[in-house]
Each structure stands twice: as C-alpha cells, then as structure tokens.
Amino acid sequence: MEFDLIELIRQRTVQARDDVRLGIGDDAAVLAVPAGQELAVAIDTLVEGVHFPRGTDPADIGWKALAVNLSDLAAMGASPAWALLGLTLPQADRAFVEGFVDGFSRLAGAHRLALVGGDTTRGPLTVSVAVHGFVPPGKALTRAGARVGDAVLVTGTLGDAAAGLNVLQQLRRDEDDRDKLRDYLVERLTRPTPRLAAGVALREQAHACIDVSDGLLADLGHICAASGVGAEIDAALLPRSSALLGLYDDATALHFALGGGDDYELCFCVPPDRLSQVQADLSRLGCGVTRIGRIVAGTGVRVRGHDGGWMEPGMPGWEHFA
Amino acid sequence: MEFDLIELIRQRTVQARDDVRLGIGDDAAVLAVPAGQELAVAIDTLVEGVHFPRGTDPADIGWKALAVNLSDLAAMGASPAWALLGLTLPQADRAFVEGFVDGFSRLAGAHRLALVGGDTTRGPLTVSVAVHGFVPPGKALTRAGARVGDAVLVTGTLGDAAAGLNVLQQLRRDEDDRDKLRDYLVERLTRPTPRLAAGVALREQAHACIDVSDGLLADLGHICAASGVGAEIDAALLPRSSALLGLYDDATALHFALGGGDDYELCFCVPPDRLSQVQADLSRLGCGVTRIGRIVAGTGVRVRGHDGGWMEPGMPGWEHFA
C-alpha cells in the first residue's frame, strides 16, 4: 500500500521551502537549518481509542496530530519548519488518508510547515508526528526558568477541551442535543490552535513556558518541579469561555479548567515589570492572556478557592488531578 | 505511566554530545547542527504482529527500531546524531522498557547517537523512531543519480534476513532444531547492522544508493525509477552467506536473495573507473562488497539466471516479488 499513499500525501502537503533540499521520496529528507538558528524537535503519538474515539473524522485526526506537536514548538518559542509522519493504518484506506491529509495540510499550510518524510505501515490506527522548528541560540523557552515573584499567565481559556470531550460523551446518548456552545467546545477538543505566534513573542519576555496538554495543575507543576519553585493560583482568575460557563455549573467548569487536558494553551511565567508589555504584545496578536497567579518559594501548585481558602484534594474541581 | 518510563529511558540513553543544547524533559529538544552540515532525517515505524512477531525479545525490538532508521541515514551517506522515540505500549511495563532501552542504547552508543526526545503512550505495541544525521551540503547520496554504464554493487550478503524469518517460522514446529547457522540467520533478521561507515565512504564515490529493506529487486527498482534507467543483475553474482547456502537449496537461497527484505545492506551504483577504489575502501572498513550487475538504458530490473537466460516471473527464485 505504501507508495500510492505516500505519493498522495506528498502531493497534498508539498510546501515550497528553500531549506528543504530533498523532500519525501528518498531514504531520508535533506534539510538546511538557517545560519544563526538552533533546531527545536518534538515527537507525539496519537492512538485510536486512547487519544481520539473510534470514528473520529480523519481530518480532525490529521489536524490534531500536527497541532499537539506544533504546540510543543510554541511552548519553546520556536517557529515551525518541517514534519515527519509515521502513519499506521489497519488497511490501505484512501478515503481515510485523503481526509487525514486535508486536516494535516490545512494546519501545516497556515504555518508554512513542510512534510518532508513519512512512513505508512499496516497495524492499529496510530499517528506519530515529529516536528522541527527554529529558535535563535540560547533563546528557547524552557520549563526551568521560573523565579519567585514571577506572574503566572495563560493564553486563551481553560477547560474547553475537557468539556468538549464531555459533550461528545453525552451526545452518544442524545444525538440531537447540539447547539453552538457545544459545537464550540467540541471544536476546541478536535481542532486545537497551537499558540505559535504567542510563543515567539514570549521568547524574549517569559522566564518559563509550557503548553497545557495534561491540565493546568499538572503542567504548571512541571514548571515548578523544573524551576525549583512553587506556584499559587486563584480559581477566580482562571479564564473560562462563555460556552463552558453557559453549559456547566461553576464547580464543574472549575474542575475542567484546573485539571482538563488538551487545551494546548500556553502557561508561562514573567517578571511583574514585564506584565503590561506581555499583555499588550499578545493582545496585538489577537491572543487572549490572563494573569492567574504567581510563583512562590516552595514546591507544587496551590489553588485559592472562591471562598479565599486553599482548595484541598477532594474538593469540587480538584478530584482526579491532585 | 509516562514520566517514570521516560526518566528510565533518559537515564539509559544519555550520550554526551555538545550539539544537544537541551535533551529529554522539556516540551522539545534544542539542537545545534554543526556549521557546514545539512540535516538528513527519516522516520520508520515497527508494529507488533506486522514487523516482528508477538513475543519478540524487547531488546531485539529496541535494536531493530533504531537500526532500520540508521540504515536510511547510511543510504544517504549521513552520519547519525540524534533520535526521537515514540513508544506505544499496552501497559506501563518496566521490564519491557528496560529490555527495549538495552537494545536501543547498545546500538545508539556504538554510533554516539543521543536520544533527545520521546513520547510514551498507551496502545497496541508500536515503535516510531525518527533519526537525524549530518551530511555536507550537496553530498547526500540519493536514489536518483544512477547512470548507464554504472556498476551495481551490494554490501554484505543478501537473503539472510528472509531465511532467518523462515527459520523462526520452522522453529515454531520443532523447537530443538537450532544450530549455529540458524542462529546466524535469525540474528541477521533481529539485529541488522546499518552500514553507516560504508555510506559515508560512498558519499564521494557512488552515483546512487539505497538500503535493501524491501528486497533487492524492489529496492534496485526504486533506484531505476528515480534515475530513469534500467538494471541487469546476474543471479550467479549475488553474495549469499554460507549459512544461507548451508541450510537452503540454491533456488530457495536465490529466492531469498532477490526478494527477501530486511537485510539492510546497501545497494549502490558507481562508475566503472571507481570500482576498484570503492572495493578497496569498503574492504578496509571490514565491509564486504560485491559487484552484481550494471545500469543499462531502459526501465526496470532484469535478472540473468544460472543458465545465462533472463529469469521470468514464475521462475524459481522470482515468485511473489515481480
């Protein structure tokens, strides 16, 4: 099956980039990293039945398989350039591949990313994507630079993707129960927007950055562990979409915002004296940004609840994520 | 499961390389391509039940998942530097990961390759590896440069891996029927040797190169298609190991040598006036090399049989591979 499908993928994902010396079709691609740039690379795998339900629109799978990887580049402040695709399919399914490539190439094209190599194999539906981006030497945003006193911020809104998953699970029971709010939340799950422009803008400003893939508490916890600090966040400050608040009670919405994964927003730390500049920069990019707390001495993430006290494991909004 | 296993993988695969600015543990790795080098990148996926049988030694899976990728770099004449690993496992199985990493890191260490990023997910056992190597600008060996009159050569011996698979299938019926010849063939299947030093040596000499992963006829056919030429090879010249010839009759051994995949030898084309130099260079590296035919005008690959006539589809040694 391999050659036809790879040729189909090649035709639909070709991007004219001077730095691609040799693209899909040989034993390896040959690429030129521009002078004065380092390479940021990441790999992520999506598995049917684990990361997306059986029957998911192939175009959504193609989009998301690339988006979750581009989100890793965004979190490093890198600009995307190239991708490799490892696509495992139960059978040579041209319709699936066409849909997949449609979603993949729509997002790739928006960022001038070239697919430079691929491998299609037979087996359970699994998608591995490796992405490559550029970042000036020494400028990559890591998880390790947060300092006591930094403000903690997030882009966009939190909890939508977890709510979107919940909507999909409910829909199985009542197929007609759809509306615009539900559609919005489901699309936040199936078509996440990697915050690439924001990541580049933060490169010179933020001390530390991560993308929210496992949930805010978990991912901010990674920043704390890597930086040797703690964090305090205010539940009342968490940015939540009107769709989320329109369809779920406050405790459930908070639960999704604190612990739900798959939002692919950026969570980052900036010194207080850069706060207004960062907010202005991101707003100019059309990217919402909200201060949700601060970095403190210590370890781990504490959440101040609506009553002003610290939330504890077992409280509403906290379960499963401690 | 993810963090413990990635930490285990990180500890056992760490390689001190100055060009790794940031390795496993952040959203992406940050890497520096040396000045004056281009990047060769490839991705390959192995699936349980498709590329290796259930119950395969995890160390063999780790070795082979890297070896098949390094073989792609060898075919380009690139020197390996970094790898990314996407590992999908049915459950968090520490013993499996330890074995896998043992095989992977043994081969990686032999080539000073650093694992710089990874992703472990839950699902059917699937391994995607992406590798990165260096090659001087314009010097990558492609499939596209073969010219009429070139000699066609291969490294090592052909057909061993296909015979090794046959041995494994026979062993299921008679577990005691093992000996050194069988062990040799099975090891050629499970622990292929990527011909990296040979690939680098061929960079200035060969017009075209490919690794034999799908079988000689198929892979030499790729060179012919990419180069717009044909090829004629002599069955009598095909290098076959004493193990292969000791365990199989001539027609079966020929069948494996022409059509069997997974040998990961290099097949390449050099102008006649460089033939003795190339043979001397590869011999000095301890890499066997054999001239098996020549590039001709036309299309496709023809094989001259032992009787001096052209072999036809349906003849012994040809079936299934036309």
Image (tube, coloured by chain):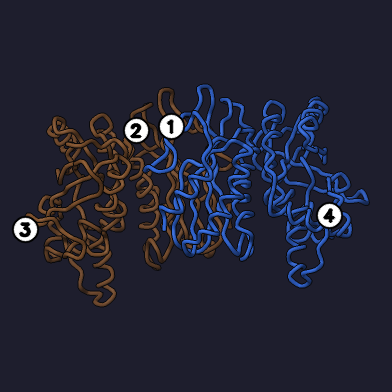
Chain colours: A blue, B brown
- Name which of mark 1 and mark 4 comes first in the sequence: 1
Task: Provide the secondary structure element on which disc 2 rests.
Answer: loop
In the rendering, at what x and y percent does residue A103 appear? 61, 50
Task: Provide the secondary structure element on which disc 1 rests.
Answer: strand
Which label lies toward us, 2 or 4?
Answer: 2
Spatial separation of the CA atoms under disc 2 and disc 3: 39 Å
Q: What amino acid type is highlighted by mark number 3?
A: Asp
Question: Which image quadrant: the N terminus of chain B?
Answer: bottom right
Q: Which residue is mark 3?
A: B307
Q: Chain of mark 1?
A: A
In the rendering, at what x and y percent does residue A276 appear? 83, 27
Which label lies toward us, 1 or 3?
Answer: 3
Instruction: Name the mark on residue A21.
Output: 1
Spatial separation of the CA atoms under disc 1 and disc 4: 46 Å
Which label lies toward us, 3 or 4?
Answer: 3
- Badge 2 vs badge 3, beta-carbon distance below 8 Å: no
